[in-house]
Amino acid sequence: MSAAADSLAHAVKEQEEGLLNCVHCGFCLPACPTYRRLGDEADSPRGRLHLMRAVVEGRLDPGSEAFQTHIGRCLGCRACEPVCPSGVEYGNLLELARHVGGEARRLSLLTRLLLRVFGTEWLARPAMFAGRAARATGIPALVTRLLAGSAPPRGPRLGLAMLAASGPMRGLRAAPAGSGSPRPGAAARATVGLLTGCVQAGLFSRVNEATARVLEANGYQIVPVDAQGCCGALHAHAGDLEAARAMARRNVEAFEAAGVDYLAMNASGCGAAMAEYGSLLSHDPAMRDRAAAIAGRVRDVSELLAACGPLRGSAVRMKATWDAPCHLVHAQRVSSPPQTVLDAVPELEVLPLAGATECCGGAGIYGLTHPHLGGWIGGDKVRSVVESGADILVTGNPGCMMQIGAGLRLAGSGVPVLHLVELLDESYRRAGLYHGESDHGNGSRP
Amino acid sequence: MIPGRLTKELARICGRDAVIVDRDRLLVYESDALTAYRHRPGAVVLPRTTEEVRRTVQAVVRHGLPIVPRGAGTGLSGGAVALNGAVVIGTARMNRILAIDAPNRRAVLQPGVINAELSAAAAVYGLYYAPDPSSQTACTIGGNVAENSGGPHCLKYGVTSRYVTGLTVVLADGSVVKAGGQGREAPGYDLAGLFLGSEGCFGIATEIEVGLLPVPEGVRTLLGIFDRIEDAGRAVSDIISAGLLPAAMEIIDGPTIRAVEDSVFAAGYPTDAEAALVIEFDGLEAGLDHEAERATHFCLRAGAREVRSARDEEERLALWKGRKKAFGAMGRIAPDLLVQDATVPRTTLPAILKGISEIGKRYNLIVANVFHAGDGNLHPNILFDRRDRDELERVEHASKEIMQLCVDAGGTITGEHGVGLDKKHHMPLIYGPDELDTMWGIRRVFDPGAVMNPGKVLPEETEPLHANPGQDPASGELVGAPAPA
């Protein structure tokens, strides 16, 4: 038994009770995207938990091919959690297993590189700038169009297509200069700090701006939180718990200092991670309670909007379909608020999407680390979007936007992908709800 | 481990990614949902077609190895556990619905199709597949055929054998036999009937034809709350005696109620109650209210604290989810469980429930009951922690006593979970040598070489001439926690 195995045995010992909750009933199998496609129980949640338990029992080396492959192949979509009668906290156990697996064997170079970039500000800024600059040249979009339909989306082609897909939808207005004005007659609502994030800030600043506008229009007061940083979700998912904890501490302090009522999230992966800061820092007596308090204030932007029965905008005559991000619907169990927000857009026809709650295969950096399986899962999602007959796909997480957007482009489909708040923002803009807008004079202004 | 030559041959037949021989990976196949029995298979093969199954069976048998079929591994009798390094043939990739013939209310499917997904696919035609094991969201129709599975609604609708009208089966010698099909009555001997419930010992079903039913016009679901479980048992017996025919009658006892209410499938059962009785009537709208009123009357007369009626479909589904996910929710009470499956005459339910509770107390074990009361099909779940050797021993004793109690009351050792590994040693409790000899005779017609799921269902020592001295006689024992490496 290696030293790493000892370390796992030690680390997982505390989680043993969590593992023991699994009675092996198998109800999670059909919920798992990898099991459904591969049919191997080692690629099912129950199988992975069994491997984890075997490591704890000293029957399996965490450096073994089996442990590394099958724990590594999990999307981390957590679709197994809502169907588990015993309430096994699979997501936490997975991060721990990856942590231990990573001690037994190093993460791949690509994974380490990407995590380093996301987690380090002075690396992230130039990288995101380079990404935006490349996107602005139009080359990724052109290459993506030229290569459409030639082969399953993976490798550098997927990377380029993802970059192209991170851009705004054509035909959607450029962001208005003004800010959202509070709902007429409504008392000022809670104060909100917005997690600006790493990828959102880098490639989706328009989504951050739209988030602030629609929240303000509904009476929320946005408080800037300057000292914040990357949420650490990708690091935790990859098992780099120390890095994730450092980022969590920084954010807890930053949002505490801002003294906001809520932390607004427009990336469900970040939302799920921050909502679990309490358990991530549970071994840190100085931070535990503070982290749990901050985690308790985390809300997806759709929750904040649904809570105030959002202001209705002007008509957007389109057919839309909603894809539920895993970390929103499975990890945070938020399912109806996005529907409420869609309902606030008059004349928007919302079509059902087959498999709307199944993972798109994006899963953080999965599409890049597991191109074959990620491409397979992504391809199925693209097919169901196309078959839905919708003009636009709406979702709530930048990773999903890039993954599905890239898949659609490479499949030669013209269906654009929008963030939920971008759609609501457009509806509000058409209604003239924002300062500095002069066309459409029907909006109510203070 | 299997010989390298066989690995190569299997990879040629099914593709390299369909053959699992790595010892570590095989760990996940060491048990089904009854984790008390654990044996690592020699290999796992995941074929996609009847032809691949046929050639896989031939190759494995040629190398003198036994075969175990496996669906989703949700079984509760150790039936899919591979003894003596057997090769598992998994049906997870044989998951296509081949045809739904709505006018004739028929469907043809591969064995790996999930039970609930067949009903979901049939729903667009206003049809559904009636047998509804509690594991229906995960278990496969192939597994249902092997176990002749029941479920809550089998009280009115009957078990799997009533719905399977045709089978394509691969036998141990590699022959492909079609039994029944295209309707009901097949002239000659009922091969499909014989195959149903054979627990993988006769062959592997690779295509299954089933009958579908129209979704009932109306449904009424009641929840009776009791302070004593015996009273709930009496209500069940009274309802049946009065000539009512509910679609389902399920009892969930106090410990189970509290585990379920703690889970994401909380159904709104009061946590201070000692029994919840779920009763459902379905069929034509006319008359349903009257039946529900009469059942309510019998519950109150037997001592129910109150009887509620599900107001809408959402409430009804919540009541059922609580019941159907109860087994999984037991993990909240203890890490391991052994579930019994004895069926007793309904009139003896109150006395048996009391007896089970006394056995639990005597051995200092938690016994949680959640069961198909209408059929008298009990599911006492004995909860334990296999790391505790002493407790493990008490579990074995208590389990045997519960079984004996049920048999003495005129019951039988399994209602629907199958015999598998777990109950094969109890078979002599209910069958004499003549019956067992007959069963062995039939088994050897299908499987003369003793290669299909050996070591299951019939205890080896009862086989005439005892043809298999090589079988591991200790395989029917519970497995404790492994010693640390």
Image: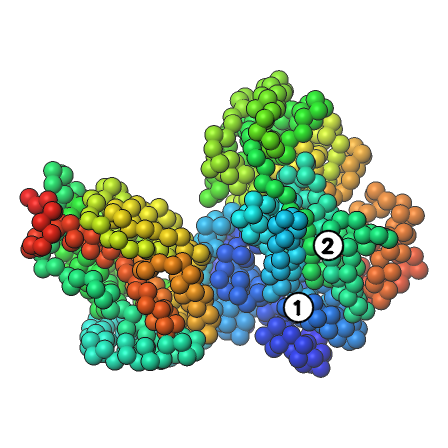
Asked whether the viewer can see residue A21, the reply is yes
**Amino acid type assigned to the residue bearing label 2 in the image:** Gln
Q: Nearer the viewer, residue B481 or B193?
A: B193
The disc at residue B182 is 2
**What quarter of the picture does the N terminus of chain A occupy?**
bottom right
Circle 1 packing at 10 Å, graded few (<14), some (14-19), many (20+), is some
Circle 2 packing at 10 Å, graded few (<14), some (14-19), many (20+), is some
- Residue B450, x across and y down, in percent: 83, 64
Residue at 67% from the left image edge and 33% from the top image edge: B374
Cα separation, mark 2 vs mark 1, equals: 20 Å
Callout 1: helix, strand or loop?
A: loop
Asked whether the viewer can see residue B363, the reply is no
Q: Which quarter of the figure has residue B323?
A: top right
- Residue B459, x across and y down, in percent: 82, 54
Left or right? Give the position of A61 relative to B235: left
Q: Nearer the viewer, residue B297 or A323?
A: A323
In the rendered view, would you say A156 is above or below B336? Answer: below
Left or right? Give the position of A154 relative to A270: right
Left or right? Give the position of B284 relative to A131: right
Pointer 2 indicates a residue of which chain?
A: B
The residue wearing badge 1 is: B49
Q: Nearer the viewer, mark 2 or mark 1?
A: 2
